[in-house]
Image: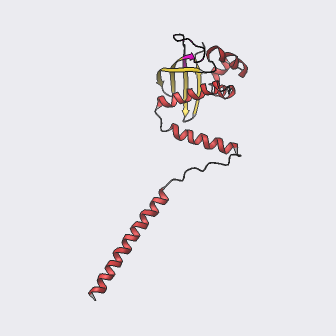
């Protein structure tokens, strides 16, 4: 009888340990967040939403300065890549109306400040609420001469992660 009681206790311990392990395993499996599945490459809207979501998640981990430099880099990247309409669409609406009422006027202005490859140095950044002002030094990386950078302020208004508008000092 004593041996049967010990056998029952061993079985109870083993069953308890198995239940605990299964509970932990179930918690781990249920607690894991599913990674978003990459959409079918043919569904352009889904691909753009997927990319935007991943950018937003990445921006949420960045410090303010890093985010602002990312936004400015995106804007300047569009310009260097010849994607003028994308850069134009990032401009603050009132700024656009005052300085560049058309995409063509914006495109005509760009070569006066930016080259095919601009070297950008971030000199300073200041914040006032959701408005950030970045002081930049811009040099033509291909034809520019050292000591002749153009100074420009770029203003970024961040409404939310990856939702921003830009304006800048027209020089």
- Is 46 placed above or below 59 here? below
Is residue 78 inside the magenta stretch? no
What range is drawn magenta here? 138-153
Q: What is the residue that sits farthest to the front in this orientation?
A: 142
Judging from the image, the colouring scheme is secondary structure
- Is 49 placed above or below 82 here? below
The residue at 60%/17% (across/down) is: 142
- Is 102 placed above or below 61 here? above
The residue at 54%/10% (across/down) is: 148
- Residue 76 placement (x, y as % from top left): 60, 25
* Left or right placement of residue 3 versus residue 43 in this view: left
Foreground pick, 14 / 106: 14
Q: What is the residue that sits farthest to the bottom in this orientation?
A: 1
- Residue 151 placement (x, y as % from top left): 54, 14
* Left or right placement of residue 8 versus residue 33 in this view: left
In the picture, the quarter occupied by the N terminus is bottom left
The residue at 69%/42% (across/down) is: 44
Is residue 149 inside the magenta stretch? yes
In the picture, the quarter occupied by the C terminus is top right
- Is 59 placed above or below 145 here? below
* Left or right placement of residue 145 versus residue 18 in this view: right
- Residue 15 placement (x, y as % from top left): 38, 74
């Amino acid at each position: 009888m004593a041996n049967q009681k010990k056998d029952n206790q061993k079985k109870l311990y083993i069953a308890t340990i198995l239940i605990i392990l299964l509970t932990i395993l179930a918690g781990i499996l249920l607690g894991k967040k599913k990674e978003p599945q990459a959409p079918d490459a043919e569904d352009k809207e889904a691909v753009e939403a997927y990319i935007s979501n991943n950018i937003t998640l990445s921006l949420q981990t960045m410090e303010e300065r890093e985010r602002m430099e990312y936004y400015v880099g995106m804007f300047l990247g569009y310009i260097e890549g010849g994607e003028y309409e994308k850069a134009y669409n990032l401009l603050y609406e009132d700024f656009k109306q005052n300085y560049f009422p058309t995409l063509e006027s914006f495109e005509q202005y760009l070569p006066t400040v930016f080259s095919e490859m601009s070297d950008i140095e971030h000199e300073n950044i200041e914040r006032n609420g959701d408005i950030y002002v970045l002081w930049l030094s811009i040099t033509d990386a291909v034809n520019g001469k050292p000591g002749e950078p153009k100074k420009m302020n770029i203003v970024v208004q961040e409404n939310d992660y990856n939702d921003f508008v830009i304006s800048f000092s027209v020089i």
